[in-house]
Amino acid sequence: MPTADWTLILCILGGGGLALQAGMNGTLGTLSRTKLFASCWSFGSGCLPLLIYFLATMRGVEISRAYHDAPLYAHFGGIMGTIYVVTIVYLAPRLGAASLLSTAIASQMTTALLLDHFAWLGLERREASVGRVVGVLLTIFGVVVMMGGLEWVRRVLRSDQRPKSDEEHQQQDMVMGDSTKPDPIVNEPTTTTTTTTTKTQPKKPDWTLLFSILAGTSLGLQAAMNAQLGHYSTPAYSALFSFSEGFILLLLLFLYDVTMGPTSRLDPPWTLNIVTTVPYWAWLGGFLGAAYVLIVTIATPRLGAVTVLGTSVCAQVIAAVLCDHFGIVGLPVQKAGWERCVGAVVVVGGVVLITVL
């Protein structure tokens, strides 16, 4: 059993930092008027600390093995990370950190479970035990609770079981042929009373959650791809390669966006001067992402991947709920009612089952 030491605190800080990163990147994308700029900056600024760490630890390492021996798919981790970051930037202001990250975590855990069970992408086979499957189901159920799924079901049931109006009862009697009702008198003036029934339509789930599921799946695939690349080089090189690949891809997309894409048609036109209106803390998202990668790189050999993943994810969920409740880092205020609190506890419990059993 791994020994809990000071690196466990780093895992908690790293998981909480990812929750803050969602709000920072989302705010940067909103205020700068282009989401691709925020995504590009997140990757580009994260490359700097990773480059410093790589140069400090590269002595005696053969990087050429990563190109000759590593499988082709091991070099696609940056693309998966790009999908995750772009999704966070676009959806964080709309869904909030807690709902967005919890949905992504549920799909990430499901993806990791399948990758382990079938030994895909070069991972060592780890059979999906009953405890791990129950943990995934608990995580998904917790996300549904946090998103107000139970309240939505209750409203649907209430709308189906609402009391019938007098007009509906009369229509039903006519269809059933009720003879106990006296026939209406012809030519007798009648007074019709119209009963207005107010029906509250249940709020439907947000369809953009499908993209957060895609983001979590991409993050699970990225972890396996980066692990394979790190196996043939070093974890530091794998993280730097992943960030650099994502940065180059997003930079090309951003240049297209500002020259021929939607951003080129903004009025007033987009210029770099517009970023002067962005608060300083919104620029720190990339550094938090790089810090998380470094923390995982340092802590995994000491605590093990299971402990690192479980601790950081639990901290991430709790921090996301707090960020939404207080509206930290530009996120819209979403008060932590009983459903969000219970859902967060269930998500954390499911993650614990997955990582321990």
Image (cartoon, rainbow, N blue to C red):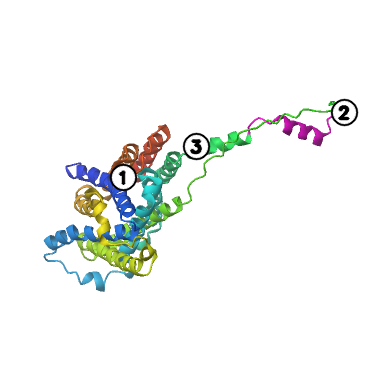
- Write down the residue under mark 1: 330
Residue 65, relative to residue 33: is it above or below? below
How far across and down, in percent of the image, does residue 19 sit?
Answer: 30, 46
Can residue 319 be seen by looking at this rendering?
Answer: yes
Is 81 on the left-hand or right-hand side of 58? right
Of tags 1 and 3, the one toward the viewer is: 1
Give the Cα separation between the discs numbered 2 and 3: 49 Å
Of mark 1 and mark 2, the one earlier in the sequence is: 2
For residue 214, what is the image quadrant? bottom left
- Residue at x-position 54% and y-position 35%: 154
Q: Is residue 173 magenta?
A: yes
- The answer to whether marks 1 and 3 mark residues whose Cβ atoms lie closer than 8 Å is no
Image: magenta residue range: 161-178
At label 1, the amino acid type is Gly
Of tags 2 and 3, the one toward the viewer is: 2
Secondary element at tag 3:
helix
Residue closest to the eye, 67 or 97:
97
Residue closest to the eye, 123 or 200:
200
Q: Would you call the spot at circle 1 few (<14 residues within 10 Å), some (14-19), or many (20 or more)?
A: many
Residue closest to the eye, 280 or 114:
280
* Residue farthest right in this picture: 186
Give the Cα separation between the discs numbered 1 and 3: 28 Å
At label 3, the amino acid type is Leu
